[in-house]
Amino acid sequence: MKKLNFLRVILIIFLLTVNHLYAQELPKVEGKGRVMFFNLEGGFYGIIAENGSQYIPLNLKDEFKQDNLKVYFRGILRTDVVTTYNWGESIQLEDIYPLDAKEKEFKIYEWGVALGCYTDNNFFNTSRPEIAQIVKLPVIYVEGDDVDFNLKVSFNNGKPTDSYPKVPIQNSQLIWNNIMASDEISSLKSLKLDDNRNLVSLEEIKPTLNDVTTKWLNFNGTNSKFIFYEGEMNFSNKVEVEFNTDLAEVVIKNNFDYTVYNIVVTTQKGSFFEPQYMYFRVDSLPPGEFKGGKFQPLDYKLWIDDLKSQGFPESVANSFHKIWFNPFTSKTNKGNWANLIYRIPQSELEKLIHLEFEPTPSVVKRILYIDVDISKLLM
């Protein structure tokens, strides 16, 4: 009898071990979806994931048996279990919670620069300058709670040309699904952008873009502090500039039907060997109005202060400054140059390039600077 009991204990341990090892080999799934009631085969509750996959939870608690309940779920696919319902795949839940009960708050910050010429309406929207200038690109950062989110970028009057992390271009859109924002970084994967338009390599500026206090973003195993995209769009510059070089004066006029902000004209005086970088700035200029004044010695914090005034974190403002200050203010590779830089309202940016998030962020701050080469006005 004792020998028989001992054999039973050994058999039970063996079966438990095999079952444990088998469960470890079963595929796992997770994501967002909805609990739905189906009035079939006597009625049952299933989960339809955002990607359309259908699951029958084997251990769904009564508190989650609510029709159309939006949830996050994680579990093991039980390919070894067959149910009487001719629907979906069986899943043994490891975690599930209502999304409404754990609503996340996260903030989005995006800066970018659109580059163009004084009389040309073909502008290039980027965050990396050209090598000849020094840098350009729109960059998106995330602050707040750890969150998984989807992002769609739509060009309403142009087309995207590149992205990071890389996603395919679909009908003038870029779509990132299941971006994970958190304070931790997992294994790194190195991706490179296509080198086009004689741009500075993303690898060169990636350390600066990552030197911020915002969330780490993981997409398909690629980790970075930022999401990046570039594209081409039609945009007609309607800010006029007139120079009086003898008097060291400049006049700026706004011909848009909306106010533009932080309007800056930069140029260089002095010799090639002893350059003096100068600027003239207007805080804001309503439609149809103009303002003039004299050039002053360069202010180091021109765009840091502007980004911070719009609610951007200081580290994000500093990353922009480190990349764009020199291209805006000191074209050391050429003489007799001038730049016009101004910020358009966020509402006008939305008309050009629209961002769509799921779930919706609590805050979305977007800045687009227009950078216009006005060197030929000095000739």
Image (cartoon, helix red, strand yellow):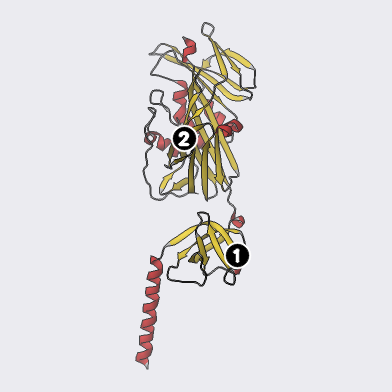
Q: Which of the labelled discs sits on residue 160, or is there none? A: 2
Q: In the displayed image of the protein, which residue is found farthest to the bottom?
A: 1
What residue sits right under mark 1 in the picture? 37
From the viewer's perspective, is residue 312 above or below residue 33?
A: above
What count of labels does the image hold?
Answer: 2
Across and down, in percent, residue 331 comes to 42, 20
- Real-space Cα separation, disc 1 to disc 2, in angstroms: 41 Å
Give x and y (percent) for residue 168.
43, 42
- The type of residue carrying mark 1 is Phe
- From the viewer's perspective, is 284 left or right of 296? right
Residue 107 lies left or right of residue 336; in this view the side is right
Residue 182 visible from this viewpoint: no
**Within-10-Å neighbours for mark 2: few <14, some 14–19, many 20+:** many
- Return the disc, 1 or 2, that comes first in the chain's sequence: 1
Please name the residue shown 48% across and 45% down the image: 176
Q: As shown in the figure, which amino acid type bears the numbered disc 2?
A: Pro
Image position, residue 122 (x, y; %): 49, 24
Which residue is farthest top? 246
